[in-house]
Image: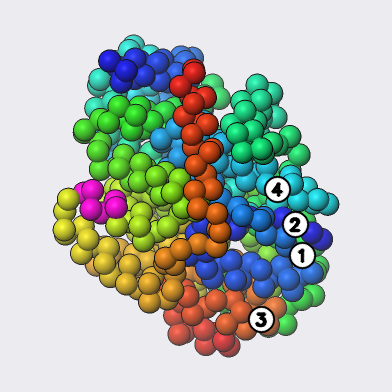
Amino acid sequence: MEDLKQKQSLFKDVQKMVQSCIQCGTCSSSCLAVPAMEHTPRHIWRLVQLGYKEEVLNSKTFIYCASCYYCTLRCPRGLPLTQAMAKLKEIAVKTNLKKHKSSMNFYKYFVKNVCCHGRVNEIELMTNYLISTKNPLVFLKYAPLGMKLMGKGKLPFGNALKEKGILDVLFRKVKEVEGKI
Amino acid sequence: MNYLYYPGCSLEGPAREYDLSTRALLNSLDVSLTELPDWTCCGATAAESVSYLLSLALPARVLAIAERVDDCDQVVVPCSSCYLNLKKVEEKVKKDPALLEKLNIVLGAEDLSFTNSTKVKHLLEVLSKDICLDTIQKKTKKNLASLTIAPYYGCQCLRPYSVFDDPEVPTTMGPLLKAVGAKVHQWGMGPKCCGASQMTTKSDIAVNYITDILRAAKGADAIVTVCPMCQMNLDAYQEKVCSAAKEDLHISVLYLPQLLGTAFGLSAEELGYDLNLSVSKNLKQKMKL
């Protein structure tokens, strides 16, 4: 129930962001990932405007957004399109959308990692993410690069921060303030 | 010249040579850096996918720490992703006082606050706008005339905020490269996307982006970058790209301050060349390293 409410409220945010979209398609023609998408960004914004929540959230369009900001830069209406794509990812993370579990896990583990250590710990992040894929072949895919980076001392085990849990308070407060919205 | 320095997480790990070369280069230009004490992660692009408020609170915390340091109100950031996150807070808060208040509520929980008085600058902005081109020319001891360099800007130092360069046709690296004698490779890929973290989550499509960039760089001796993610995507996956494309697309990739530092006569050790993943022997010979 909580999930559904949150999903609706966040989806409304996206609707507000793109409500004045005129369907010119500049975003789609600027997007590098269009060949991999079943719905172009322009199409997604139309579906958002019309309230087709499930179609939008089940599409891979927002998963393929790499935050290059070409669409945001070029949108003749000045709409925050990259931010709207991120908001769709946020809905997927917050409501545990199964379809996009793998990509969402990466974002989740990243943030967890930062919360825990204050700075990114690449070894832990990649290990947790790769385990979450439950595919040993993916491990093999990244092993050579991991070894190479380790060999060059580019994957430190710790960081220079002395205080453990330095971001605990900030994370707690963000949750509290967000809960009030 | 004094700047606060926010290295960001990558520069402590996979992009250590970017940190080493930035510090060495700026030091030789008599720019002093004060690293922010106990800085924390900016959230990269991942935080926004988890929580919008968190994605602004993390960089706001960094800016709050910056404001605690006396006598300096500008922070230089070499990583484009960190730069954009800090810049985003700077720009958004300018237009939205309510956001400043909200972020201060979050920061207040650990007795921090910020007023948005710190100017956020990318390393490329400092090198191309704050430092006189004459100074770069005068510092050059080793002419790099035998080299053709492909300047790669990536996305997030250019877009969505057009602060110091054209977001579609960037040119700021050109004069810097020419100042040290190098030729500039003419290509249109400078501001294109490398795929960023998609190389981890959706590598099947990100490989295509990298292939296009490496292919367009053919004819250049090296690509120079100003972002740890661009660097990693372009230099770490070359074997994969070459075998998928069935053509030789190997090329040296180095950070801009490494190239400029080389021209200034700084040693390969100071500039962290042993940490790069793809700098060819041939390039090192040409640079007399």
Label whose residue precedes the other's in the sequence (3 or 4): 4
Q: CA distance from mark 2 to mark 4?
A: 10 Å
Q: Tell me whether marks 3 and 2 sit on the same chain.
A: yes
The residue to which callout 4 is attached is B66
Label whose residue precedes the other's in the sequence (3 or 2): 2
For the residue marked with disc 3, what is the amino acid?
Leu
For the residue marked with disc 4, what is the amino acid?
Ala
Q: Tell me whether marks 1 and 2 sit on the same chain.
A: yes
The part of the chain drawn in magenta is: A128-133
Q: Nearer the viewer, residue B17 or A25?
A: B17
Label 2 near label 1: C-beta < 8 Å? yes
Q: CA distance from mark 1 to mark 4?
A: 15 Å
Q: CA distance from mark 3 to mark 1?
A: 17 Å
Camera-nearest label, 3 or 1: 1
Report helix, strand or loop for mark 1: strand
| Quadrant of the drawing holding the N terminus of chain B | bottom right
The chain holding disc 1 is B
Provide residue A43's location: percent of width, then percent of height.
33, 23
Mark carried by residue B3:
2
